[in-house]
Amino acid sequence: MNDEAAAEGAALESLAGEEAPPGPSIVGLTRILGALLLALLFICWPLFNARSFPHLGLFSAPDIVHTALAATLALLAVLLLIGAGQRSLLLGTAGVILLSVLVDELRLQPWAYEIFILLVLFAVVDRRRALAGSRLYLVGLYIWAGLHKANGEFIDRVVPWFAEPFDVELSASSALVLGLLIIVLETGSGLALLLAPLRRVAVVLLIGTHLAVLVILGPWGHDWDINVWPWNLVQALLVWMLFWDWRGSGRVLFAQAPRWLLVLALVLPGFHLVSWWPANLSHAVYAGNFAQPALLVRPDRAASVMRGSQRTYLAPGLPPPVREVLNKVGGPSASQPWALMRVHDWAVTDLGATVPPDDQVARRLFRAFCARAKDARDVLLVLRPKRRLFHGEDDVIVTGCDGKEQGRVPLPESWPR
């Protein structure tokens, strides 16, 4: 490390003329983020590279651009891991992450958003405010992760699924109790991080939560959504590093954290309740209440739409609830032969990450498949939108590639809840 880099790294470590506050070093935290980004790039390489699964970007880019961005991001992750945390490196890495998302919003995963926010935070403010902002970001993460789970679908669908790896079949009352316990645990632990007497208890509970998630989603459980495995390990490590030895008060934390971080961590995630802010930016992970799209394709035209993946990710026939919706809507689409594109299985298996669970993303993904079709009648979207706060409708909407709504019906009783 040259003298200039050392001086810049030292500048990140303390305020001018003041003793550095207790807590982890920014350089150490940066290296952890670099290691996490490198691991996720390795696990989710097709997510960042060229592939057969559609890219959803604000603008299209040739395959060589995606490959170049992926390689550049891998190099920057290595430099973060071994470097001194210079501001130029932090901002450069954040910039490449942002550009990668602009050419494909499927990369807007919760961990990508967190890495981006923390890198910017470490680069633009002094150490004291950076540590306060990092702590506040985690506080907001756990509070909103718990609050977004406070819905019937989390209790009815997600909680029983969590129990499956343990060969436990939960009754309705048991699922309710366990679901409420999870909601209280996450939200309460986030709040307890602000209170010095309860802080270490919260740290232990949150580390235990992340380890439980690894058991449920890891190779010993569902073996699903591999990208969240290293993220949960790093989250547990960050909670311990940022909060275990910290003795400050919540009031001081709010005073020291940048105002823009307050908005990102505590205010904007609430707008997801009315679908005005993306789920993956709102910490609504495995929250149950999300968009449920069924993308349908004519079996004889699947090869052009799916570009060779139809053998693995094309389910013969349709689930009864989807067939019921088509029959109720009627019209030519009900009489055509359809097969279900299992896009979530495709994404998790080939990309290593789930598709962001928002209505808008489902519709844009549908349009991307429509763009590949030789005939606009080859693809169909059957969407049950996310339930929004203060919005009473609960319909399933059928849309064709022409963008016109073919019909909507009340949610069938047979629809999985």
Image: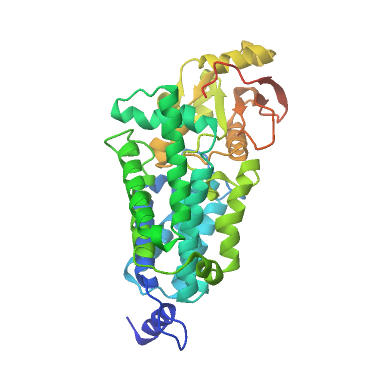
Foreground residue, 376 or 325?
325
Percent from the top left, x then y, of residue 249?
47, 67
Foreground residue, 79 or 181?
181
Q: What residue is shown at x 49% (from left), y 46% (from top)?
A: 145
Residue 333 sits in which quadrant? top right
Quarter of the image with the N terminus in it: bottom left
Percent from the top left, x then y, of residue 361?
59, 40
Residue 172 sits in which quadrant? top left
Tell which residue pokes out farthest to the bottom in this image.
17
- Would residue 249 be seen by someone viewing this image from the given angle? yes
Q: What residue is shown at x 31% (from left), y 69% (from top)?
A: 82
Q: Is residue 257 above or below residue 106?
A: below
Percent from the top left, x then y, of residue 66?
48, 52
- Would residue 308 be seen by someone viewing this image from the given angle? no
Q: What residue is shown at x 41% (from left), y 77% (from top)?
A: 21
Percent from the top left, x then y, of residue 396?
64, 24
